[in-house]
Amino acid sequence: MPFIAPEVILEAKRMDLLTYLKNYEPNELVKFSGNTYTTRTHDSLKISNGKWMWWSRGIGGRTALDYLIKVRDMTFLEAVETIMGHSAIQTPVYCEQPKNEDRPLLLPDKSASTDKVFEYLFGRGIDFEIINYCLQNELIIESLPYHNAVFIGYDNEYNAKYAAFRSTNSERIMGDCTGSKKEYSFRIADGSGNEVHLFECAIDLLSYATLCKYSGKNWRDMNLVSLSGVYAPKKNMEESKVPSALAVFLKNHPNIQRVVLHLDNDYAGRQATKALQIRLSDRYEIIDDPPPYGKDFNDFLMSKMNLTPRKQTERSYER
């Protein structure tokens, strides 16, 4: 393989897709709505706020390099040479990217039907009443055109600020919607009481709520908060930051005295638990309550209900 100088590769990686298309392939770019664009060749490929997602294929990325490799089937070398070749002839004018805090949340279109999402969640063992509650309150919606489950988080005025999508078919496609603010991650909580329960993801939260209902507890009286993904502490755990979703919830609810950690039974989950115990034990009672067996609470729930998880091909993308 021919040698490419590291600084050339870095320069190629710096170019976002919108900048590339506007400068070098303007006829391929089609305005969809607001600050969202699509391409003439692939109308399901959407570009917004510095990211792109090809929804029909479950492929996404940020850069023009990603696009040329994943969509145009170029090799890494061909993609770098294409970008830098254009740049040598015409210096690109970069599109201004909004800061993350200024990016509006880009929610997918909502399906009138919730059949696919209901079937998916019910197949994961989630209780009918809990699914219904989430759908009625638009904590979960079914998206169009691909019928993904979309888990939505709201601020104190019930404005949607966070959304994570997850496929309901055999392919495990997942990611955050553009403009998502993790401090408002998916939760079922009214802030009353003195206890908050913490989970890595929405499915684990819903699984725990289901287990509580089946054991006679009132899940609606609990503060259930998800972290929207695994929390990675620093090597020196005392220097680790508290995850933004938990930090904001605790700040807004000074009545909380106890934090119950329901993180996964894997290395990452156990490390995250240790870090939060170190960071929060001086102000709160910290209880470590992982699933009794299985990797996470959905594994535990499905095992208790004798449900067999569907085999999935895992692909995780950020929209």
Image: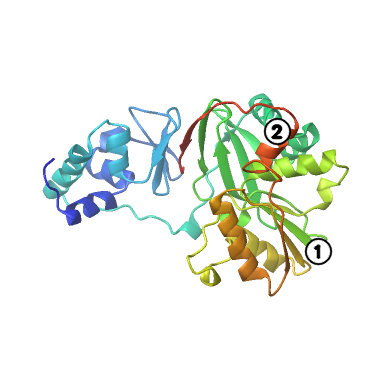
Q: Is mark 1 on a helix, strand or loop?
A: loop
Q: Position of residue 310 (x, y in %)?
A: 59, 26
**Toward the viewer: 107 or 186?**
186
Q: Where is residue 2 in the image (x, y as percent from the top left)?
A: 11, 43
Q: Where is residue 92 in the image (x, y as percent from the top left)?
A: 22, 51
Mark 2 burial class by Cα count in 10 Å: few <14, some 14-19, many 20+: some
Mark 1 burial class by Cα count in 10 Å: few <14, some 14-19, many 20+: some
Check disc 1 and give the amino acid type. Asn
Q: Quadrant of residue 311?
A: top right
- Residue 24, placed above or below residue 241: above
Residue identifier under label 1: 194
In the picture, which quadrant includes the N terminus?
Answer: top left
Q: Position of residue 124 (x, y in %)?
A: 67, 31
Q: Residue at x 74, y 44 (%)?
A: 208
- Residue 190, placed above or below residue 166: below
Check disc 2 and give the amino acid type. Ser
Residue identifier under label 2: 303
Q: Residue at x 58, y 61 (%)?
A: 243
Q: What element carries label 2?
A: helix
Q: In this view, does 104 lie to the left or right of 66?
A: right
Q: Is residue 302 left or right of residue 161?
A: right
Marks 2 and 1, Cα distance to the nearest angstrom? Answer: 31 Å
